[in-house]
Image: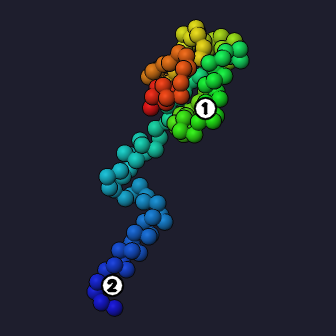
Amino acid sequence: MNKYTMICAFFGLYISLHSLIGFSQQTRGFFGGSEMDFLMSKKPAKLIIFSADWCGPCQAAKKAMKENVALKRIIDSYEVVQYNFDVAIPMRRKYNVNRVPTFIVVADGEEVRRQVGFSSVDKFKNFLD
């Protein structure tokens, strides 16, 4: 074996062992230790949906969320919480919701944005992105 082959074999083994171990917290690099913990502990934003059974746009939004693949992928990146407008009166008061459908994005306990109504899938995707 020549010197080059030995060096390549050593680095290959080194990289394989680190990937099996999972790059433990003793390994310091760009994202070692506390930086990685912060990134891993970040919770996804919540998508809060207020809708009603009697609401036509609400039913259209539900259908679009189930059938449109691109929209479903975007929604899957959120923690989705759904409320029935007629039943969840305390939550309506908390979020100041008077019309349906209402979509609220909440990150770190703060409301980031809100959309009232549903007119098209493209507008809804732009709201969520």
Residue at which label 2 appears: 5
Whether residue 23 sits left or right of residue 103 in the image: it is: left
Question: The C terminus lies in which quarter of the figure?
Answer: top left
Image coords of residue 84 (percent x, y): 68, 18
Residue type indicated by callout 1: Met
Q: Is residue 10 above or below residue 107?
A: below
103 or 9, nearer to the observer: 103
**x and y, in percent, of residue 115 in the image:** 50, 18
Q: Residue at x 42, y 43 (%)?
A: 39
Which amino acid type is shown beneath numbered disc 2? Answer: Thr
Describe the element under mark 1 as helix, strand or loop: helix
Classed neighbour count for the residue bearing mark 2: other residues with Cα under 10 Å, few (<14), some (14–19), many (≥20): few
Front-most of residues 1 and 75: 75
Q: How is the image coloured?
A: rainbow
Residue 33 placement, left or right of 61 = left
Q: Residues at badges 1 and 2 in contact (C-beta under 8 Å)?
A: no
